[in-house]
Amino acid sequence: MHAWLKIDSNRIITYISAKHYLTNVVVSMMDLLGYTSNLLSKLFFMLSRKSFLQSTGLAAGAALVPGFSLALTPGSIAAGRPILTKPERSNSYWYIGHLLSVLLDSVDTGGQFSLLKMTEPKGLEPPPHIHTREDEIFTLLEGEMMFTCGGETFHAKTGDTMFLPKNILHSFQVVTEKAEVLIALTPGGLEKFFIEMSMKAPEMRAPPMPSGPPDIQRLITTAGRYGVKFPKRP
């Protein structure tokens, strides 16, 4: 009788210990599921926000507003690394008579946008063209420009901002002797075209005016790799 009770009590103790262990396992699994659910919710929110910013172009516009910042992913902005930037030799290039500074490239912003500062001399404007990948936002820091987009003409002056949607034929002319512009490209990536077609700026001034036309075939071919098309003129 006593032996039976001893054996049975051992079983009860073993059962209670196993039940306690399983309870801890279930609680741990519930905690893990809760953490995973919370993480997935945050991830869904971030991806939804990224898609919204890409579709509306607000990421590029935010870069033009002093003191405004966005937590985007991936990239240094998502990693919480603020960037203070300005035109300097390390980020500047001579592009076919233009002084170009890449203030923020697509790596800096996780591909959301690129931000360029450019000196646009009169007489070196590109022919009408179409961007198939990115929208452009021009903000005039100095000077005047005429933009033609979708059959409409716009006269932009110092302080004005011009939005040029992708997939619409557009062109521009510099009205003053030169124009200083801030150009946002959303999404980013086209800054690589300008870098590929440029040389590093040896000094922070506009390069001499070209003595002749650029290599048109190289320009068209290179631009084509970045989704920029130059329709043939009738």
Image (cartoon, rainbow, N blue to C red):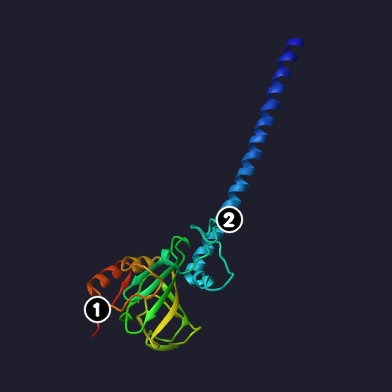
Calculate the distance from the C-alpha at mark 1 to the C-alpha at mark 2.
Answer: 55 Å
* Residue closer to the observer: 165 or 197: 197
Q: Please identify the quadrant where the C terminus is shown.
A: bottom left
Where residue 210 sits, quadrant-wise, is bottom left
Q: Residue furthest front?
A: 203
Camera sees residue 173: yes
Task: Give the numbered dot on residue 137.
Answer: none
Mark 1 secondary-structure assignment: loop
Please state if 40 lies on the left or on the right of 171 as rendered.
Answer: right
Camera sees residue 1: no
Q: Which residue is mark 2?
A: 41
Above or below residue 120? Residue 11 is: above
Where residue 120 sits, quadrant-wise, is bottom left
Above or below residue 39? Residue 13 is: above
Please state if 126 lies on the left or on the right of 142 as rendered.
Answer: left
Label 1 sits on what residue type?
A: Pro
Crowding at label 1, few (<14), some or many (≥20) Cα neighbours within 10 Å?
A: few
Where residue 181 sits, quadrant-wise, is bottom left
Question: In the rendering, at what x and y percent does residue 207 appear?
Answer: 34, 75
Q: Are marks 1 and 2 in contact (CB under 8 Å)?
A: no
Query: Which mark lies nearer to you, 1 or 2?
Result: 1
Q: What is the total number of numbered labels drawn onto the structure image?
A: 2
Q: Please identify the quadrant where the N terminus is shown.
A: top right
* Residue closer to the observer: 134 or 35: 134
Q: Earlier in the sequence, mark 1 or mark 2?
A: 2
Residue at x 32% of width, y 84% of height: 123
Label 2 sits on what residue type?
A: Ser
Question: In the rendering, at what x and y percent does residue 149 appear?
Answer: 38, 84
Question: In the rendering, at what x and y percent does residue 102 appear?
Answer: 42, 68
Mark 2 secondary-structure assignment: helix
Task: Give the numbered dot on residue 213.
Answer: 1
Question: In the rendering, at what x and y percent does residue 221 appear?
Answer: 25, 69
